[in-house]
Image (cartoon, rainbow, N blue to C red):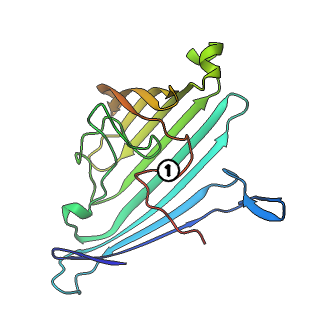
Amino acid sequence: MVDRVQNAALVEILAAYRPGLKYYIRNGNKQVIDNSAPVLGLRVKTGLPSIGNSTSDFTLVEGSYRHRFEAGRKGDINLLLRAGAFLNNTYVDFPDFQHFATSEILLTRLDPIGSYRLLPYYRNSSGEEYVEAYVHYQFRKLLLTNIRKLHLIGLKEDLFVNYLYTPTSDHYTELGYSLDNILRVLRLEFVTSFRDGGYEDFGVRLSFTTNFGGGNNSGETELTEF
């Protein structure tokens, strides 16, 4: 795929691999067992200065690991790790920096796995290296879900940690608690952010319920498995 935006010619290659993926046979049909294997992702993006009037001259390599798995009898963990670096950044225009999914407003449609809640837009966008980590633990029962009626109507409780490292992020970290599946359609989150271990901000986010660990998140590009 080659894109030209103003004076930039770009090539981006995406791939994914699921080692150890398991299947089951039902009525002669082979079907994937959900969450039986992690997804290993690879992304390479290159700016080509030799095409047309393009001035872009960089190479970004990114790897990712995503997996959802049971954590004993108490709940499920959804984990996303992603890291990348510009091996060559001779010329990287700002739109080609690595930008991070976030929301500075109350209402959001971002997927909870792979996005930040309080990170200011573009403040820590990187033209160098970066590391992202998202860990969500969804409990079968925690606080409100110990109330039988709330548990039976499908209310879920999550604890989560989001982390970002870039040369300017000062080890940005978010800690949050969420109520998911409210009235089957809403998700309410309470989030606190820190930099270098010091308090930075507190916020509340409201979104439509997402299937914990299911589907492709809005911050992720759909990958082709091989």
Left or right, 40 with reference to 55:
right
Identify the residue at horizontal 37%, vertical 30% (top origin): 206
Quadrant (top left, top right, bottom left, bottom right) of the N terminus: bottom left
* Place of residue 48 in the rendered image (x, y in percent of width and height, measured from the top left): 27, 80
Q: Is residue 126 above or below residue 153?
A: below
Left or right, 131 with reference to 92:
right
Task: Characterize the local packing of mark 1: few (<14), some (14-19) or many (20 or more) Cα atoms within 10 angstroms.
Answer: some
Residue sitting nearer the eye, 102 or 207: 207
Residue labelled with disc 1: 81
Residue 186 visible here: yes
* Place of residue 160 in the rendered image (x, y in percent of width and height, measured from the top left): 49, 33
Quadrant (top left, top right, bottom left, bottom right) of the C terminus: bottom right
* Place of residue 56 in the rendered image (x, y in percent of width and height, measured from the top left): 22, 75
Q: Element under label 1?
A: strand
Residue 142 visible here: no
Identify the residue at horizontal 41%, vertical 70% (top origin): 44
Q: Is residue 136 above or below residue 56?
A: above
Q: Seen from this angle, which residue lies furthest top?
A: 147
Give the quarter of the image for residue 174.
top left
- Count of residue discs: 1
Residue sitting nearer the eye, 177 or 83: 177
* Place of residue 88 in the rendered image (x, y in percent of width and height, measured from the top left): 30, 72
Amino acid type of the residue that numbered disc 1 sits on in the rendered structure: Leu
Left or right, 37 with reference to 53:
right
Residue sitting nearer the eye, 23 or 83: 23
Give the quarter of the image for residue 128.
bottom left
Q: Is residue 144 above or below residue 162?
A: above
Residue sitting nearer the eye, 6 or 96: 6
Q: Is residue 58 above or below residue 188?
A: below
